Amino acid sequence: VQLQASGGGLVQTGGSLRLSCVASGVALEDYAVGWFRQATGKEREGLAYVGESDESAYYAESAKGRFTVFRDNAKNTAYLQMNSLKPEDTAVYYCAADSYPTNLVSMTRFGADYWGKGTLVTVSS
C-alpha cells in the first residue's frame, strides 16, 4: 500500500496550488482521507478531512475558506486545493488514509492506517 502526495512547490503569496494524493494497493474510497502539514520546528497540524463523500469535508480553522478537499474515486486520488496562500502555509504537506469511523482530530492525535510521503510547499512573501 502506498500513498503518494505531490503538487507542492514554490508559490508567491496569494497564489494557489493543488496537491494530489494517489493511492496504490488500496481502494481509497474505502477510507477517510486527511491532509496534514508540518512546518519546521512545529507539530503536525491537521488541515482537512473528507469522508465517503465530498459533502463530509471538514476543515481546521487555518484551512477554512481557503482550502478545499475532495476526492475522485475513479482515479483513486484525493486532492487539496489551496488558494490565497500565505507565507505561514509553508510546510511539508502529507496525506493519510484511515479506516472508518474516524475524523480529523482522531487522525491528528492517533495517526492513520496509511501515510504518504510529504510534498513541500513554500510560499514566498
Image (cartoon, helix red, strand yellow):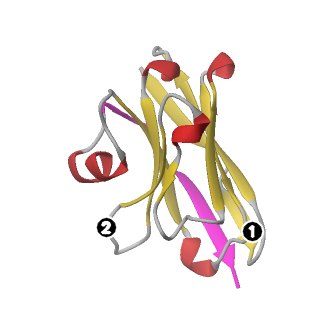
Q: Residue at x 67, y 17 (%)?
A: 74
Q: Position of residue 58 (x, y in %)?
A: 49, 51
Is residue 4 toward the left or the right of residue 79 in the image? left
Q: Residue at x 65, y 77 (%)?
A: 86
SS assignment for the magenta stretch, majority:
strand
Single out the residue that lies furthest toward the left: 110
Q: Nearer the viewer, residue 113 or 102?
A: 102
Neighbor class of circle 2 (other Cα within 10 Å; few <14, some 14-19, many 20+) is few
Is residue 15 shown to the viewer in this render? yes
Contact between labelled residues 1 and 2, with CB atoms less than 8 Å apart: no
Number of numbered tags placed on the structure image: 2
Residue 103 location, quadrant: top left
Q: Nearer the viewer, residue 64 or 1?
A: 64
Magenta-colored stretch includes residue 115:
yes
* Screen quadrant of the N terminus: top left
Q: Position of residue 112 (x, y in %)?
A: 30, 37
Name the residue tied to disc 1: 11
Q: In the figure, 6 relative to 59: above or below?
A: above
Neighbor class of circle 1 (other Cα within 10 Å; few <14, some 14-19, many 20+) is some
Amino acid type at circle 1 is Val
Q: Position of residue 104 (x, y in %)?
A: 37, 49
Q: Nearer the viewer, residue 6 or 63?
A: 63
* Screen quadrant of the C terminus: bottom right
Q: In the figure, 4 relative to 104: above or below?
A: above
**The residue stretch that appears in magenta:** 113-125
Name the residue tied to disc 2: 43
Element class at badge 1 = strand
Is residue 17 toward the left or the right of residue 89 in the image? right
- Disc 2 from disc 1: Cα separation: 23 Å
Residue 12 location, quadrant: bottom right
Is residue 124 toward the left or the right of residue 36 in the image? right
